[in-house]
Amino acid sequence: MQEEQIQERLDSLKKEFEAGQKRLGELEAEQAYVRETMLRISGAIQVLQELVQDPKPGSQETEQKEAFPS
């Protein structure tokens, strides 16, 4: 009887372990996706900041500043 209970507990723990491994894999995949998304957002932020700080010659904002200096 006790051996049967031990085997049941062992089987239960193995299933729980497998479920944990599966969930860990899912979380790692989600983490990679979030990192990639954040990297793209960071790049977009950098580009937009550069555009705001240093407009290119010939842009509408530059032409307005040259026509009407402060």
Image: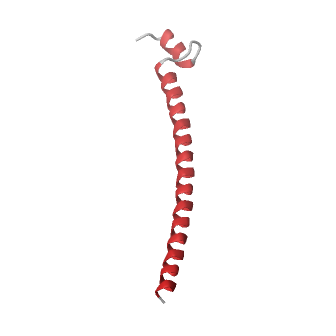
Q: Where is residue 24 in the image (x, y as percent from the top left)?
A: 52, 57
- Observer-nearest residue: 52 or 36? 36
The residue sitting at 54% across, 31% down in the picture is: 43
The residue sitting at 54% across, 66% down in the picture is: 19
38 versus 47 height, above or below: below
- The quadrant in which the C terminus is found is top left
Q: Position of residue 33 (x, y in %)?
A: 57, 46
- Observer-nearest residue: 49 or 2? 2
- Residue 63: which quarter of the image? top right
Q: Position of residue 64 (x, y in %)?
A: 51, 15
61 versus 32 height, above or below: above
Q: Position of residue 34 (x, y in %)?
A: 53, 46
- Residue 58: which quarter of the image? top right
63 versus 14 height, above or below: above
In the displayed orientation, state which residue is furthest to the right.
58
The residue sitting at 50% across, 9% down in the picture is: 66
